Image: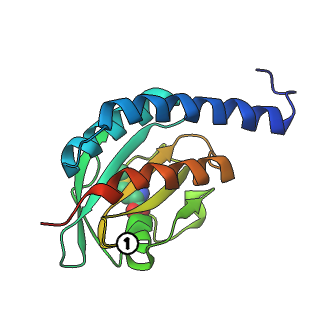
Amino acid sequence: MSIDTPLHKRAHHKQARYDRLFQRLDGLCEGESDTITLMATIACELNLAFERFHWVGFYRNMGDRTLKVGPYQGGHGCLEIPFDHGVCGKCAREQTLQNVPDVAHLPFHIACSSTTRSELVVPVTDNQGHLLAVLDIDSDLPDAFDEVDERNLARIASYFSRVSRS
Ligand code: SME
């Protein structure tokens, strides 16, 4: 695929990759309702699916307005993020998707890696809508995420709708 490829075809190409990813995840995660097992499997498969992702992982809601790192792929992530810090904290507080095209322009961004240029964070809730975690994806490329990623990563979060908080 060249740089001259029209945008809609690139979006189609990207969607086709997501479709293959969901086929694999549907098979791997069928009947699985353990939170950590789902997180580990999803982080692994997402990381393998796209070269432009250099960190993929979950920060788990500890119930005291802090997040702790969960299963991930990439260099080491910071261990704990309070709800009032970082893009992950904002996602947890507001329970809305955060798409940051340029982290350098966001003073509250937490830089776990100096090479990160853009970031997408999605809330993950259980079958009663309680926040379980946030899914954080970082890229070394600027503006790496668009509406195709937003739509598909919101769908990833739906694997957790079968989980009940114990
Ligand atoms: N950048 C995130 C912190 C997590 S790491 O990037 C893995 C944030 O601002 O919340």
Quarter of the picture holding the N terminus: top right
Q: In the image, residue 10 lies at what x, y percent?
A: 76, 33
Q: In the image, residue 147 lies at what x, y percent?
A: 67, 53
| Residue at x 31% of width, y 37% of height | 30
User: Is residue 110 visible from the viewing direction of this image?
Assistant: no
Looking at the picture, which amino acid does disc 1 mark? Answer: Ala
Residue designated by label 1: 92
Q: In the image, residue 65 lies at what x, y percent?
A: 24, 78
| Residue at x 47% of width, y 47% of height | 138
**Left or right position of 129 against 138:** left
**Location of residue 66 (image quadrant):** bottom left
**Left or right position of 1 against 108:** right
Quadrant for ligand 1 reads: bottom left
**Left or right position of 24 against 130:** right
User: Is residue 57 visible from the viewing direction of this image?
Assistant: yes
**Location of residue 141 (image quadrant):** top right
